[in-house]
Amino acid sequence: MKTKTVAVIIITIACFMIGLLFTLHQSLTGSTGDSRNSALSERMDNLVSTITDLEQEIAAYEGLIEQYRNELATLDLVHQTAAIQAYQEELKTAQLRAGLTQVTGQGIEITLDDNYVGMRENPGGDPNHYIIHYDDILSVVTDLKSAGAEAIAINDQRMVGTTELRCVGNVILVNTTRLAPPFVIQAIGNVSILWDTVAYGRFSYLQQNNFPVAMTSGEDLVLPAYKGEMQFIHAQLN
């Protein structure tokens, strides 16, 4: 734009000079000879040629400016697209780690259920000896976490950092959702490590006491995303 402005000023001055020379030419026509007329005509031709060259140069600069603008717009679009893709990948990774997306992978599935056979065989016994308690589930979940489980769900309730696993009376709550037996605990991770860790923990105790518990492995376990709310009142971004 600066080059174009300078060129316009030059052309304006040149046009002024042509007009001035033309006026002088008219005033001197009657009293000068052919040689002076010829000199003025030559000067005018030179000025016209100069103006034509400047116009061509301006047109060339305008073409370059338009080319550079188009290239800059293309570069900006490429950079913006790459940045958006990078942010999207970071968002997906953060959602995966936070448990906010459905995940699929190899892992194990553990089923814990009350010992109804023991209840029937001992009608006068303490029923607490034959039901799955909160601490049974918590022990299994703790074993899974220590074994490196990457994702855990209990009866389709995905466990995240803010998950509440607690007992209220005879009710077990996970993510404030009331759960009832059988309790199906799914975990994604290294199958052999998960299996060995759980098999020698609380699961083994329940099995030895005739609880109907079971454990299977799979290559394509599907764990749902966390569906509850996440409220952070005291924790702030640093």
Image: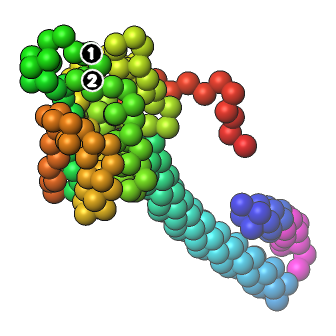
The residue labelled by disc 2 is: 129
Q: Count of labels shown?
A: 2
Identify the main secondary structure in magenta: helix
Toward which corner of the image does residue 167 lie, by quadrant? top left
Q: Position of residue 225 (x, y in %)?
A: 32, 36
Q: Position of residue 57 (x, y in %)?
A: 64, 75
Q: Establish if 223 lies above or below 176.
A: below
Relative image position of residue 155 (x, y in whole percent): 24, 29
Circles 2 and 1: CB distance less than 8 Å? yes
The quadrant the N terminus occupies is bottom right
- The region drawn magenta spans 17-32
Foreground: 5 or 29? 5
Secondary element at image label 1: loop
Under mark 1, the amino acid is Asp
Q: CA distance from mark 2 to mark 1?
A: 6 Å
* Image quarter in which the C terminus is found: top right
Relative placement, left or right, of 116 versus 186 is left
Residue 126: mark in rendering: 1
How busy is the neighbourhood of tag 1: few (under 14 within 10 Å), some, or many (20 plus)?
few
Residue at 50% in and 32% down: 162
